[in-house]
Amino acid sequence: MHNDLLYQITLTLIPNIGDVHAKALVNHFGNAEDIFKAKKKELEEIEGIGSVRARSIKEFKDFKNAEEEIAFIEKYKITPLFITAKNYPQRLLNCYDSPAMLYYRGNADLNQPKIIAIVGTRNNNEYGKSVCEKLVEDLAGENILIVSGLAFGIDSIAHRSALKNDLKTVAILAHGLDRIYPTQNKSLAKEIIEQGGLLTDFRSKTNPDKQNFPKRNRIVAGISDAIVVVESSIKGGSLITAELGNGYNKDVFAVPGRINDTKSEGCNYLIKNNKACLITFAEDLLENMGWKEYKKPSAKKQRELFIELSDDEKIVVNILQQQQQIHIDELYIKSGLSSSAVASALLTLEMQSVINSFPGKMYRMV
């Protein structure tokens, strides 16, 4: 395990090799160690790698930083999550730029069935605070994991509200796990570790530099089923998270505000431009996500008998028969089919009255 981890971390240190390239290499070779043992010509032939990146891999010999990171991981009982690990956040696998390596300290299940991100301005007003607190309070008992970015303002309010209402919460960091930013949130971070966790793709000794926050935001968006923007200016970082969420095919929601309030300008913009669904209460979120308790109707449409299913449709039906309902992202993962194949199978099955679709990209058998 130590040897595997050494190569996994080292892969993230090689110049010119980003997360997309690292995943392409892992998909080809199956593990990190074999990447370093491969011949230069074999590396060059992998799509997106080429001669420059192949040379970077073959010439890289500095394993010292990776060894130091392993020592840090072992000392502070941090869980490294390489992209091939079973407990790696599976929702992130559907994001083209998901991190090849994550570092985690906590006890929350990063593959929990229901995960939402709550984000917003660092300079919230009382309206944003009360809306955020009420939203989280009304989600208590729904077994939902609350994700945010540990920043001042709405992020911190979301984390604290989750803790107060006995919900698990995970903070995504824009720096290594050897520090907390902002420093005023150190005590909050300690509580989060006990009732959730801290997650980052940055190694120790990494400062919270400006360019790290958009990278942090992609994890906030990618790890969640839905993103809720409570308050945001038109240029706020929360809008970046919302845009990323839309790009990842996530459900995005926004709380409306007064038209002359700059702190609600971003939310109103998202709603106006159909980039987010308007919500005012937790019930709106639960209904849109298909998370409200389902009661079978007394009468339902007769399913067509003796339907001949394609191989892809049989795979989808078998998965749906094992669960009361399922999100489309989970179908992608469990089926092993391409997104287009799953979409085609779902459309055909719905037309044949075999399945029903619900808000929030949820599906269940008729």
Image: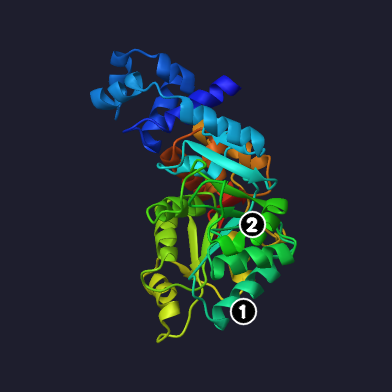
Residue tagged by mark 2? 189
Residue 274 vs residue 36, the one in the foreground: 36
Evaluate whether residue 30 shows in this view.
no
Instruction: Give the Cα separation between the discs numbered 1 and 2.
Output: 22 Å
Name the residue located 38 percent from the left edge and 73 percent from the top edge. 269
Quadrant in the rendering for residue 24: top left
Percent position of residue 201, x then y: 49, 43
Foreground tag (1 vs 2)? 2
Q: In the current view of this chain or complex, which residue is farthest to the left?
A: 51
Circles 1 and 2: CB atoms closer than 8 Å: no
> 10 Å neighbourhood of mark 2: few (<14), some, or many (≥20)?
many
Residue type for callout 1: Ser
150, above or below 100, in the image: below
Q: Secondary structure at mark 1?
A: helix
Residue type for callout 2: Ala
Name the residue located 65 percent from the left edge and 35 percent from the top edge. 75
Say which mark, if any, is on residue 219: none
The quadrant of the rendering that contains the N terminus is top right
Percent position of residue 40, x then y: 30, 15
Say which mark, if any, is on residue 130: 1
Residue 298 vs residue 276, the one in the foreground: 276
Residue 322 horizontal side relative to residue 307, left or right: right
